[in-house]
């Protein structure tokens, strides 16, 4: 029997929290770089009453993304996308961050956008980090938003001599995610579908714990201690926003980035976190 299909990229806590919120009654295709982890998370969800099949998918490889979409189409119309896959500044070198977080996300949004069903919706996860980088020129923003995916990594601003470190690479990737979401929303809209971006702050996940224990650990701990909320967030709080964006209550929201960071960005510009 054909079902509505939800593609979920990344078997991390944020992706799975959103999938639990919006994936009931649907066929969920879960793509993850480690198939073992993907299958373990699929088993956990299946035992909770969901219908999940895991597929090996490295977000940095276009052929893996095409395979993920192809597998999803076997079960019915694709009506949803949740993209929470990616790597952090402490987990990977500059080249890998740009390949996965920037290029891979652009490919995924484009390929799902080609087949998304009317009335469909999606969210991709970027980061508050993109909001702490100085503004780019309008021309640079447009290049990040509209350059053909296979030419993205050839842009001058993304060449090694113009990327200071892994954090800068990550910030550029997340800025690109936001701009790409805006451009893709125009294309998705022609199919009667919507796509939005969520930019979380410090959310307690294994990735965040890597950051807490990495070279910028003290920076991140200070960030959530001195943001207005005074604490890090949870994956379920991100899922609250995703549920709104992907459901009927969010029908007039597309091409947007929703910042959910406990006020850390506000504090960075106008409070105790100001450099």
Image: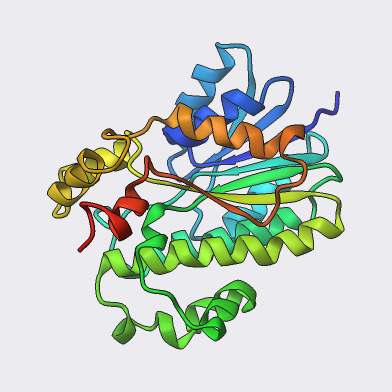
Relative to 129, does residue 4 appear above or below in the rendering?
above
Name the side, left or right, on which 183 lies relative to 9.
right
Indicate the quadrant where residue 190 lies: bottom right
Q: Quadrant location of residue 30?
A: top right
Left or right: 166 in relation to 50: left
Residue at 70 percent across and 58 percent down: it is 111
Instruction: Name the quarter where the N terminus is drawn.
Output: top right
In the displayed structure, 94 sits above or below 27; it is below
Residue 59 at x, y percent in the picture:
51, 54
Going 25% across and 41% down the picture, which residue do you hit?
224
Q: Is residue 134 left or right of residue 24?
A: left
Q: Position of residue 131 (x, y in %)?
A: 41, 61
Residues 218 and 31: in front is: 218
Residue 66 vs residue 17, the one in the foreground? 17
Q: Nearer the viewer, residue 175 or 84?
A: 175
Name the spot of residue 79 as percent of width and height, x first.
77, 39
* Residue shown at the point (42%, 52%) measured from the top left: 127
């Amino acid at each position: 029997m054909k079902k509505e299909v939800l593609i979920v990229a990344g078997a991390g806590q944020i992706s799975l929290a959103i999938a639990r919120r919006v994936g009931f009654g649907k066929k969920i295709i879960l793509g993850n770089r480690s198939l073992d982890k993907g299958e373990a998370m699929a088993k956990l969800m299946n035992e909770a009453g969901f219908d999940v099949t895991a597929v090996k998918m490295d977000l940095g490889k276009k052929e893996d993304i095409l395979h993920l979409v192809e597998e999803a189409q076997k079960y019915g119309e694709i009506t949803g996308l949740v993209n929470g896959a990616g790597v952090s500044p402490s987990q990977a070198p500059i080249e890998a961050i740009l390949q996965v977080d920037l290029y891979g996300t652009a490919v995924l949004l484009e390929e799902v956008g080609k087949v998304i069903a009317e009335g469909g919706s999606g969210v991709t996860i970027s980061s508050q980090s993109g909001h702490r980088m100085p503004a780019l020129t309008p021309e640079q923003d447009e290049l990040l938003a509209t350059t053909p995916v296979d030419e993205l990594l050839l842009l001058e601003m993304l060449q090694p001599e113009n990327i200071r470190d892994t954090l800068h690479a990550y910030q550029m990737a997340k800025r690109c995610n936001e701009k790409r979401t805006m451009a893709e929303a125009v294309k998705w809209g022609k199919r009667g579908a919507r796509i939005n971006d969520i930019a979380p702050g410090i959310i307690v996940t294994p990735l965040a714990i890597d950051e807490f224990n990495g070279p910028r650990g003290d920076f991140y701990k200070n960030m959530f201690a001195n943001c207005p909320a005074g604490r890090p967030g949870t994956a379920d709080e991100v899922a609250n926003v995703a549920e709104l964006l992907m459901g009927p209550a969010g029908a007039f929201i597309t091409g947007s980035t929703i910042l959910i960071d406990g006020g850390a960005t506000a504090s960075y510009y106008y409070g105790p976190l100001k450099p």
